[in-house]
Amino acid sequence: MKHVTSMLVACLVTFSAAAQAADDPPFLDQKSAATADGHAFFTHICQACHMADGKGAAGAGAYPALAANPRLASALYPAAMVLNGRAGMPAFGNVLSNQQIADVVNYVRTHFGNDYHDPLTAAQVQALRPQEKP
Amino acid sequence: MAEDTFMPTMTRRQMLRMIGMAGSGALMYQAMTGLGFAKESPYRPPPPLAGSGNGQSVLILGAGLAGLVAAYELGKAGYKVQVLEYNQRLGGRNWTLRGGDLYTELGGHTQRCQFDEGQYFNPGPWRIPYHHHGVLDYCRQLGVALEPFVQLNHNAYFHRRDAFGGKPQRIREVKADFNGGVAELLAKATSTGRLDDLVTKEDREILLEAMREWGGLNRDFSYAAGPVSNDYRGYARDAGGGAHGKPDFSTPVGLHDVLNARLWGNLAASDQYEYQTTMMQPVGGMDAIGKAFGREVGSHVRYGAKVVDIAQDSAGVSVAYEDTKAPGSRHVAKADWCVCTIPLSILSQIPVQVGAAMAAAISAVPYAASNKVGIQFSRRFWEEDDAIYGGVSFSDLPIGMMSYPSHGFGTKKGVLLASYTFFVEALEFTALDPAERIRAALEYGKQIHPQYADTYENGMAVAWHRSPFTLGCFGNWSDQMREKHYADLCAMDGRIVLAGEHASYLPAWQEGAILSSLSAIDQVHRRALAGGRA
């Protein structure tokens, strides 16, 4: 069993190294972060919890599926979640720009069986941020 | 608007750096937890709960340290305790992986730990500050043997890809050259009269003397190659015996280069209160603490219990749970009182019969991400080749920190903490499958320790957002959030009180779990003594 497992791990390592040698390295470096699109943010961050197929996962608690999730009908709901976080979900308002948040929300709302074509704009994300006092 | 004016021109790393998060675990941690104050634990060995529980019952949800402390103390005070635990083991995040252990994360990947006998890795807490009196006192009470945990090792590395051609620098050199350069500058400013209107003449003389000693300056207040600076930064060739025993001196890096290399950004990481020497670890793995509690209260723990509903009325609490080995099954546990230590990431998804204020608090707190990779190597090259015995190296590579075992010096094999990351890097690691995380840790780690290539044996990768029993690493409170919700989270609601690191001002630390638990059971006990009415 031990040998089987270690061989499996070795295979996985080789396979994934080949799979990732293309243009989607596992970590966004300085240059690519500035130009990363919604797909890149999904594969690097969102799928950590919502999984590569967007179907979420369940243990003592669950990560909601993004696939076919009716809560995505309004773009403002996922936008606020990404911006502020809630419960298990971290907040990304300090590390993603308004445009980047819009990009990743728009990506999720047009993939995984979701078919919403009213894109979120950076201005709408900005409006969700706490307003600075004059 | 301010946000959009800077964001598009900033890279992610610049943003992280700006908020003090890149390349420095401690500073990153502090930026994340939003705590700007010293976090000394106020714990002093508690007097036993005065008076008796008189056989009243307490249901404890979660067998992590908070739940175990509650079970132990309430049991001693005459309460009937029962603990429901989701996992098939106790300890929660107090957890150690050893050869033969199986771990299945959210998403379904199962890892079988292949470490050799005697090797281990703490995926969760791994070090105990000397001022975490609660943890240390329970270790004393329960007979958990401790040993030093090496946090600061002057011979470990600071590494940045854009500094010194990507060559890792010894911490002693960075520290000596930073201090030496600053001392020389201050001495110059002093002796050329630039500080005359800031410091008295007498103080200036003491300052010069202090700078010479602190910075390793020569008689003429220069910081340069020679015996004095080398007493701090180390030699090019160490002193020896016999005909060729005379050492060769190393040459300090000038202040301009020291400043621009920015490796000084890691110095504070081991200077801060939470990480100051002496830190400690339990001999043989952090789970020695959970196991020690288990010897006292383990018989009261029901394993594989997934809580699905928490209700209360004037007569008591009623908690519904599912046996994880029989999905869909439903059992109910009843008691007079409930201490709930379920992480908020999970509790926020469970129907809990509490008032609006506590419910809002439960849902408010996001959970921080963290990832660790532990790798077993066939030989301790870090000791044999690099003279690194314990301690932490810091890099601006996505692996963040690496740490060398503080125990087993001079033995053959060892398990290295090959990567420890928070937030964005942690989520990027989490987004990979476990085997890919290990591969990434190896690939990046090779840039610091090329010996990885020939000595890698096997590894374990634990990404806390994929942990089925926590769904995250720790409650990531902001100051504003605390202001709004913290009191409501910690105040008993009827017959239910919450505990865990999330109900403390010591986020992620075991001490936070213990102190919150002591506060929680104190509230239970007061209510119980007051006549058993909520």
Image (cartoon, coloured by chain):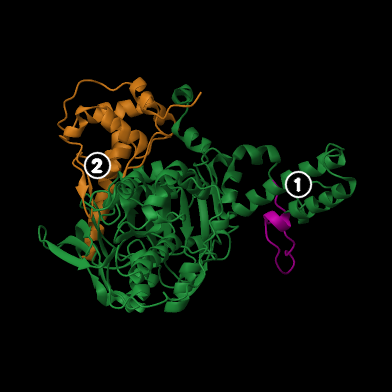
Chain colours: A orange, B green
The secondary element bearing badge 1 is classed as helix
Q: Main secondary structure of the magenta part?
A: loop
Near-viewer residue (B216 or B465)? B465
* In the depicted structure, whether residue B427 falls above or below residue B385: above
Using the image, tell me which numbered label, if any, was put on residue B456: none
Indicate the quadrant containing the N terminus of chain B: top left, top right, bottom left or bottom right.
top left
Q: Nearer the viewer, mark 2 or mark 1?
A: 2
Whether residue B190 is visible to the viewer of this picture, yes or no, is: yes
Residue flagged by tag 1: what amino acid is it? Ala
Q: Residue at x 36, y 36 (%)?
A: A84
Look at mark 2 in the image and give the residue it sits on: A50
Residue B428 lies within the magenta run: no
Question: Residue B458's spot in the image, x, y percent?
Answer: 33, 59
* In the depicted structure, whether residue B408 falls above or below residue B393: below
Q: Residue at x 37, y 75 (%)?
A: B292
Residue B249 lies within the magenta run: yes
C-alpha span from label 2 to label 1: 52 Å
Question: Residue B362's spot in the image, x, y percent?
Answer: 32, 49
- Residue extent of the magenta highlight: B230-252
Near-viewer residue (A88 or B312)? B312
Q: Is residue B495 left or right of residue A114?
A: right
Look at mark 1 in the image and give the residue it sits on: B183
The secondary element bearing badge 2 is classed as helix
- Total labels: the figure holds 2
For disc 2, the neighbor class at 10 Å (few under 14, some 14 to 19, many from 20) is many
Q: Is residue A50 left or right of residue B77?
A: left
Residue B112 lies in what quarter of the image? bottom left
Whether residue B281 is visible to the viewer of this picture, yes or no, is: no
Residue flagged by tag 2: what amino acid is it? His
